[in-house]
Amino acid sequence: MRIVALAGGIGGARFLRGLKEAVAPGDEITVIGNTGDDIHLYGLKVCPDLDTVMYTLGGGIHEEQGWGRTDETWSIKAEMKEYGIGPEWFGLGDRDFATHLVRSQMLSAGYALSQVTEALCVRWQPGVRLLPMSDDRVETHVRITDEEGTRAVHFQEYWVRLHAAVDAEAIIPVGAQAAKPAPGVLEAIAAADVILFPPSNPVVSIGTILAVPGIREAVAAAKAPKVGLSPIIGGAPVRGMADKVLAAVGVAATADAVALHYGAELLDGWLVDTADAAVTAAVEAGGIRCRAVPLLMTDVAATAGMARAALELAEEVRAS
Ligand code: GDP
Ligand code: CA
């Protein structure tokens, strides 16, 4: 079976770890990763979501934090600070720096991001085929108004420095309209037996992937059953500030509103948490099959159970 999953960082990566446990030997997983969170720092290209997937599946992730390397040290950051060079709010540890150095070196030698990602994965062996959504530069910006006035800030500044404390007025995936899907992305979607939407951020992770012209259309046209898992439980994101960016696109932070935001064009099935069992009827009224199952990724076994439930719902769709 060929499984395609669209994924952001932490929520996506943790789900994929469970999915790997749930699939049968010989099944292939292709992950289309969000690159709208990418940021250039110190002349280096940093791809937080791709790296979170790669480190999580490759055994190098800082478990508690959910991003960055395990056993990290911070000498480079401290030295940069002595020179008065920031940003202080973005955490790049010494081990992590090596990844960004290799990536940036390969990019300046002329390799595409998809080729670089493949090369980095030779070390990490994530057990999935990891494709960036695009080789072209896309950067999500967020329009905010604060004491400095109305302006657009990089998504990382909004999320990491400002902790999404001010309202997001608009989410702008800068460069997305001119971006092309990376090699293999459309082919993987067309050839998929199942397409999964992990519990990733629907706006700034999955929404950004779908904003690359061709990807949304390919998912909508794919013959495979498409099943998603809600990142919202009981009216709030499990982790992070997804409610802020959902509000910016006029979507309520509820499990049913997120499903209807994707819509029946993109989704055949949707899993909500048992705490949200009451909303299944509203989702089904939108033409999307809906089941309530436990959706907390407390450990790999629980997450594998979620992945199995998603694959079962896909089978149910296929059989219908
Ligand atoms: P990011 O790039 O690191 O923000 O990661 P993603 O976009 O992949 O995922 C973020 C989303 O994961 C957030 O909206 C969370 O609500 C969701 N999430 C995190 N942990 C869990 C969990 O245990 N269960 C569910 N259902 N969603 C989760
Ligand atoms: Ca992200």
Image: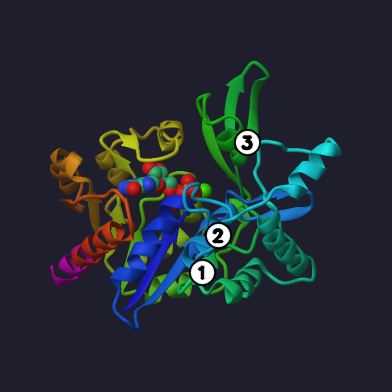
- The segment highlighted magenta reads 313-320
How many marks do you count on the picture?
3
Q: Is mark 1 within 8 Å of ligand 1?
A: no
Q: Residue at x 84, y 38 (%)?
A: 82
Residue 65 spot, x, y in % from top left: 50, 47
Left or right of 198 in this view: 40: right
Give the residue number, with chain letter if any, for mark 3: 157
Q: Residue at x 44, y 58 (%)?
A: 13
> How far apart are the two marked residues, 3 and 1, measured between alpha carbons?
26 Å
Of the 4 image quadrants, the one containing the C terminus is: bottom left
Residue 130, disc? 1
Q: Is mark 2 within 8 Å of ligand 2?
A: no
Residue type, label 2: Leu
State whether residue 43 is above or below residue 240: below
Residue 108: quarter of image: bottom right
Q: Is residue 217 visible?
A: yes
Residue type, label 3: Glu
Residue 309: quarter of image: bottom left
Residue 50, disc? 2
> How far apart are the two marked residues, 3 and 2, measured between alpha carbons?
18 Å
Between 200 and 151, the one lying in front of the other is 200
Upstream in sequence: badge 3 or badge 1: 1
Q: Residue at x 36, y 51 (%)?
A: 199
Residue 8 spot, x, y in % from top left: 47, 53
Answer yes or no: do the residues labelled 1 and 2 have beta carbons within 8 Å? Answer: yes
Q: Residue at x 40, y 40 (%)?
A: 239
Residue at the farthest right position: 83
Q: Is residue 131 magenta?
A: no
Assign a secondary structure to mark 3: helix
Assign a secondary structure to mark 2: helix
Residue 31 spot, x, y in % from top left: 45, 66
Q: Is residue 316 magenta?
A: yes
